[in-house]
Image: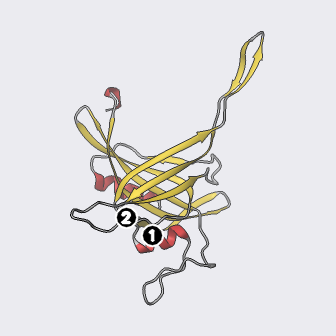
Amino acid sequence: MAAVGKVTIGFSKPYVAKYTVSNGAVTYTDCQKMARGVSVAVSPESSDNNNFYADNIVAETDSGSFTGGTATFTVDGLLQDAEALIQGLPSADADGFLNYDDDQATPYLGVGFIIEYMSDGVRYWTPVVLTKVVAGQIETNAETEGESIDWQTQEIPFTIFKDDTAKHRWKRVGGEMASEAEAETALVAALS
């Protein structure tokens, strides 16, 4: 398919899992769906190229490399268990309340999602995992319902890091899968 190019036509299934590392081996636990996905924006940053000049031309160069970045997920509203995981909150009280307090300990996480592509009229789905992230504080915005519904969404900001593997991965991209369900299975497996 890649020979004819591809166009992004969809985003879905944002998942999150707790990140841990032991002796350079990364594992994920507590994989769960965040919410229904609306959009994602991944903005990587890299160092500048490091050029060596000789005889007034570039004689040697060391290309820039990934240094960090951000990802912003827009969802229809976090599921409560996902909010607790992402923000590092203790489990909900017996009355159902999550407590944002001194016990909050924001963890490292892995996050993933599915991108739907079209190439030469054929649709396919690709799972993507950002291997190590940490969430920022999540804003709460709401507006009263008027004569018509104003659909409201929630943004979850993440800072992207290199993971603790030998190659310091920051992103993994799956293959071209024939269905969203197949891509979701692969995504959950990568975050479990």
Residue 183, given in percent of the width and then of the height, sits at 34, 52
Residue 19, given in percent of the width and then of the height, sits at 56, 63
Residue drawn 40% across and 56% down?
74
State the quadrant of the N terminus: top left
Q: Quadrant of residue 46?
A: top right
Q: Quadrant of residue 102?
A: bottom right
Residue type at mark 1? Ala
Q: Secondary structure at mark 1?
A: helix
Picture disc at residue 82: 1
**Furthest residue to the right?**
54
**Furthest residue to the front?**
147
- Whether residue 192 is visible, yes or no, is no
Q: Observer-nearest residue: 120 or 11?
A: 11
- Sequence-wise, which precedes: disc 2 or disc 1? 2
Q: Is residue 58 above or below residue 69?
A: above
Horizontal side of residue 167 vs 9, given as left or right: right
Q: Observer-nearest residue: 97 or 65?
A: 97
Picture disc at residue 165: none
Residue type at mark 2? Ala
Q: Are marks 2 and 1 in contact (CB under 8 Å)?
A: yes
Residue 156, given in percent of the width and then of the height, sits at 47, 59
Residue drawn 52% across and 59% down?
110
Residue 186, given in percent of the width and then of the height, sits at 39, 55
Q: Observer-nearest residue: 102 or 4?
A: 102
Residue drawn 46% across and 83% down?
97
- Whether residue 11 is visible, yes or no, is yes
Look at mark 2 in the image and give the residue it sits on: 35
Horizontal side of residue 109 vs 7, given as left or right: right
Q: Quadrant of residue 133?
A: bottom right
